[in-house]
Image: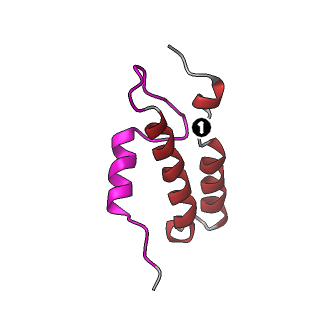
Amino acid sequence: MRYPISMAEACQSEACALQTCLNKNTYAPEKCDNKLRELYTCCQTMYEKAEGQTVQPNSTACPMRNVVERWMKDHPRERKK
C-alpha cells in the first residue's frame, strides 16, 4: 500500500522552515529550537495518526518513528512559570 503524496510530503513545510532557520543562523541550532520542535511534533502526529495501520507512514521530512519518540521524550516542553 502506498500513501498519497500528501503523506509522503507530510511535515515538509516544517522541515523547510527549520532548514531556512539553520541557514539564516549559521547553523546555530539553539536559535532554531522552536522550528525543530515544530518538525518533531508534526512527525509525531503523523505517526500517531497511522496507529494500527498495516503500513507505517514514510515522510522524507521525518526521521524514523523511534528517533522522534526518543527526541520528544528527551526534550519535554518547558513549563512557563
From what the image shows, is residue 71 above or below residue 59?
below
Q: Position of residue 19 (x, y in %)?
A: 61, 53
Element at label 1: loop
Please provide percent x and percent y for residue 70: 32, 51
**In the depicted view, which residue is nearer to us: 32 or 56?**
56
Please name the colour scheme applied to the rendered image. Answer: secondary structure
Residue 27 showing in the rendered view: no
Q: Is residue 79 above or below residue 23?
A: below
The C terminus lies in which quarter of the figure?
bottom left
Coordinates of residue 40 in the picture (x, y in percent)? 48, 51
Q: Residue at x 47, y 81 (%)?
A: 80
Report if residue 19 lies within the magenta region.
no
Residue at 38% from the left image edge and 40% from the top image edge: 65
Q: What residue does disc 1 label?
A: 10
Q: Residue at x 48, y 36 (%)?
A: 49
Q: Nearer the viewer, residue 23 or 45?
A: 45
Total marks shown come to 1
Horizontal side, residue 56 vs residue 33: left or right: left
The quadrant in which residue 67 appears is: top left
Residue 11: % across, % down: 59, 43
Q: Examine the structure image and report whether residue 61 is included in the region drawn in magenta.
A: yes
- The residue stretch that appears in magenta: 51-79
Is residue 5 visible from the viewing direction of this image? yes
Q: 14 above or below 61? A: below
Residue lying farthest to the top in this orientation: 1
**Quarter of the image where one finds residue 10:** top right
Q: Amino acid at mark 1?
A: Ala
Q: Is residue 66 left or right of residue 38?
A: left
